[in-house]
Image (cartoon, grey):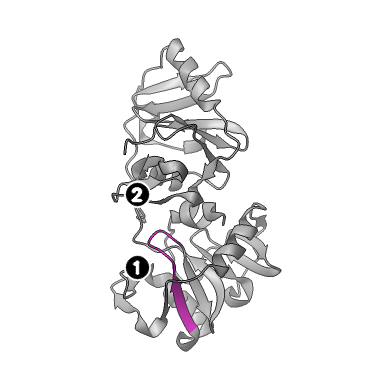
Amino acid sequence: MTRALLCSALLALPALAGEPAWTLSLDVSGRPFVSDQALLLAADVAKPSHAPATKAPPEVAPWAAASLKEKLKEKAPLSTLKKDGAHYLAASGMQLGGDYVDFLSSRVGAKHLAFGFRGSCQPVVVLVKGVPSGLLMPLNVPGAAVEAPPEPQWSAVARLPDGTRFLLDKSFVFSEAQLGELPSRNAGVPLLPEENVQQVVAWMGARVKQPFHLSDLRCGSSKDTYEGPGGVLLNARYVDFLRARVDLWPLAFHSTGPLEPIALVMKGRGTGVLMPMKP
């Protein structure tokens, strides 16, 4: 997880029944870890029934190592959490998925399990006998719902010279091929005029030396926004829509200013455009 894993791509919380469906593996400071993209856990704690074949991107391990070492604002033994239906609540109001907590408890024993909290949008540190051994995304973060947010109201399709197609609504452009099956795919969305297509191409071509990632986002001033570096505000609805449908680990945000269109880039290719929100 880069912060792009846990604070962002990780925000897509999968349904869990029993053992998580581990999909990624990595070494963090020499210790093997596995992840289902909502929970990153040391393999010696997880005791996975299978070893994920897919390796996490190389930038994930340094981020995870740093996250596990960050100073905690609060430590909460499992015994201090309150069961609330399918969730557990900490005294600070942080909400954890009950299935994940129960899974962790079954692996290490309730008396050995605690959680470290750093902030409302930050992954929770899993403590096993006091040792940081994992990162878990809390539930009560902007737009963090188990079900995918509503599909944008697509108003046009941009067809680029190379034949690739991009769906647009008033504030968002994204590669049709990356989005999978969508109800509007056959809804008769009109083609964007050629002059506007060239503008989309120009926006997607913007690059900066230091792009930011989903993991760099923080809670905005309202529950419907995320805030990126430099005060850039993003509509949580679009970010969460993508998060629920696309493998966003490689996604980079190339922002040239707090009010300028943001190029969305995956593996070096322009994949979309997101208009920032006004403060």
| Residue 175 seen in the current view | no
- Secondary structure of residue under mark 1: strand
The quadrant of the image that shows the N terminus is bottom right
Residue 90 lies, in percent from the top left, at 34, 74
Disc 1 marks which amino acid? Gln
Q: Is 251 colored magenta in this rendering?
A: no
Residue 28 lies, in percent from the top left, at 66, 65
- Residue beneath the point at 32% across and 42% down: 150
> Residue 200, labelled with which disc?
none
Is tag 1's residue or tag 2's residue first in the polypeptide sequence? 1
Q: What stretch is highlighted in magenta?
A: 113-122
Question: Which mark lies nearer to you, 1 or 2?
Answer: 2
Q: Which residue bears the numbered disc 1?
A: 95
Tag 2: Cα neighbours inside 10 Å, few (<14), some, or many (≥20)?
A: many
| Residue 239 seen in the current view | yes
- Residue 90 appears left or right of 123: left
- Residue beneath the point at 38% across and 41% down: 234
* Gap between marks 1 and 2 measured at Cα: 18 Å
Quarter-of-image position of residue 15 = bottom left
Residue at the extreme right of the image, as rendered: 30
Residue at the extreme front of the image, as rendered: 230
The quadrant of the image that shows the C terminus is top left
Between 162 and 182, the one lying in front of the other is 162
- Residue beneath the point at 52% across and 18% down: 160
- Residue beneath the point at 47% across and 52% down: 8
The image shows residue 150, relative to residue 146, as above or below, that is above
Residue 180 lies, in percent from the top left, at 47, 38
Q: Which residue bears the numbered disc 2?
A: 220
Tag 1: Cα neighbours inside 10 Å, few (<14), some, or many (≥20)?
A: many
Disc 2 marks which amino acid? Gly
- Secondary structure of residue under mark 2: loop
CB-based contact (under 8 Å), mark 1 and mark 2: no
